[in-house]
Amino acid sequence: MDRKTVEDLEKDGRDKLVIDLRSSEDFEKETYPGSVNIYWEDFEENMGRVPKDRPVYLICYTGQRSDEIAGELLKDGYEAYSIEGGYRDYLRLKLKRFMETAEEKEEILTDKCRDVERSIVKKFRKEIWRKFTKAINEYELIKDGDKIAVCISGGKDSMLMAKLFQELARHGRKNFEVVYLVMNPGYNEINYQTILSNAKLLQVPVTVFKTEIFDTVADITDSPCYLCARMRRGYLYSRAKELGCNKIALGHHYDDVIETILMGMLYGGQVQTMMPKLHSTNFEGMELIRPLYLIREADIIKWMHYNELHFIQCACRFTENCASCGGTEKGSKRAEIKALIKELAGKDPIIEKNIFRSVENVNLSTVIAYKQKGEKHHFLDEYDSMQGGEDD
């Protein structure tokens, strides 16, 4: 097996083919420059696309899949190389160079940040800025005197949310305070440094605290993701309250909402939604808000690409090396729902909006049963006393 580093790939001046073995979703978000995409599971049936007359470089998430496929190609007479460390090593090198540039060109970075800010209120005014302010007003997410912990995971959604809050204060809403809160539950070093470097680039003054959540759930086999999510939420509430905050803001967007609605119906046997705001059950006086509630994920991705920004895609230590998902949610129930919605929307775009609106137009007189504050209500409870019912 002949492995090469990303630097070796860059130094090879020959006409060569670079194949990104990751999922098409991750390839479309970002890839090594000039790469073509062949998902590792589909590689054998796409062998006809791989030439024998020039070197072939293979890059996957961590180097595992590229090692295996490069080995098979070598047996068949190809000049094939596996990129050591995979896409993570490429990002690590990119981050290193970015930090070196940051130290040398502070003024350029300041201009970059201004361009990012300008894009929010100019180019993406309709798709992002107006929908952000509409959600705040429509769902009454911010009140006078609020102190909000804007929780930053390091992904595109939470980093955009941080910039939106900065813009909100800049455009006259000064009736609230903000803390930009980053929790490190045990990220690998490249993810952690990417979060810090993006915060520096975007001039977001983050407050960082560390927990041992990933270590705590490392040996849990029964629903580790559920436990991890609950623990992370609890730590965020707790730290935010210590800082004097009465609200935490999370970066869930419109697509998260409609996926949650459909997941609840198809896999949970219930009708429910991801609410725009919630009172905390365990932390008195604390509230959760979702200011990106009306913003489409596709528009967030467009904003990210327009500004040539790179954010972490998967922060979970357990999925980043997982062969089944390759560090993404690929293979999960949410991914299945996302694909289903995409297929349905391809036939009729109104379907996405109708899923969102369905939980705003619930007719209780046509519902068999529902729960309210933990108490179950059944249509038979009042059926005999009801008069003037509608015909089918």
Image (cartoon, helix red, strand yellow):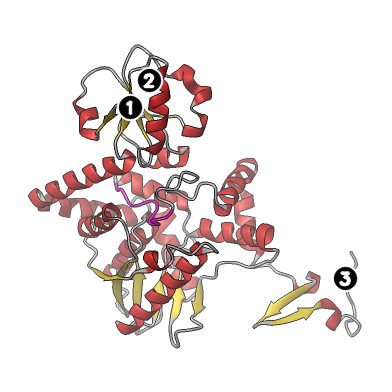
**Which of the pair 314/250 is nearer the observer?**
314
Query: Disc 3 and disc 1: Cα gap in Å?
Result: 73 Å
Left or right: 33, with 352 as reference point:
left
**Residue 244 visible in image:** no
Classify residue 283 by image quadrant. bottom left
In this rendering, which labeled residue sits more in front, label 3 or label 1?
Answer: 1
- In this rendering, does residue 61 appear at all? yes
Whether residue 83 is in magenta: the answer is no
- Provide the residue designation for mark 1: 1
List the residue tagged with mark 3.
390
Q: State whether residue 163 is above or below residue 343.
A: below
Q: Amino acid at mark 3?
A: Glu
**Residue 142 position in % (x across, y down):** 41, 77
Contact between marks 2 and 1 (CB within 8 A): the answer is yes
Point out the tag, 3 or 1, that comes first from the N-terminus: 1
- Precedes in sequence: disc 2 or disc 1: 1
Residue at image coords 48%, 81%:
280
- The crowding category of the residue bearing disc 1, from other C-alpha atoms within 10 Å (few below 14, some 14 to 19, many at least 20), is few
Quarter of the image that includes the N terminus:
top left
Q: What amino acid is found at the position of numbered circle 2 in the picture?
A: Leu
In the rendered structure, find residue 74 and report the number of the disc placed on it.
2
Q: Residue at x 66, y 59 (%)?
A: 267
User: Where does the magenta region start and end?
Assistant: 309-318
User: What amino acid type is highlighted by mark number 1?
Assistant: Met
Q: State how far apart marks 3 and 2 are (Cα).
A: 72 Å
- Residue 24 vs residue 307: left or right? right
Q: Is residue 66 above or below residue 169?
A: above
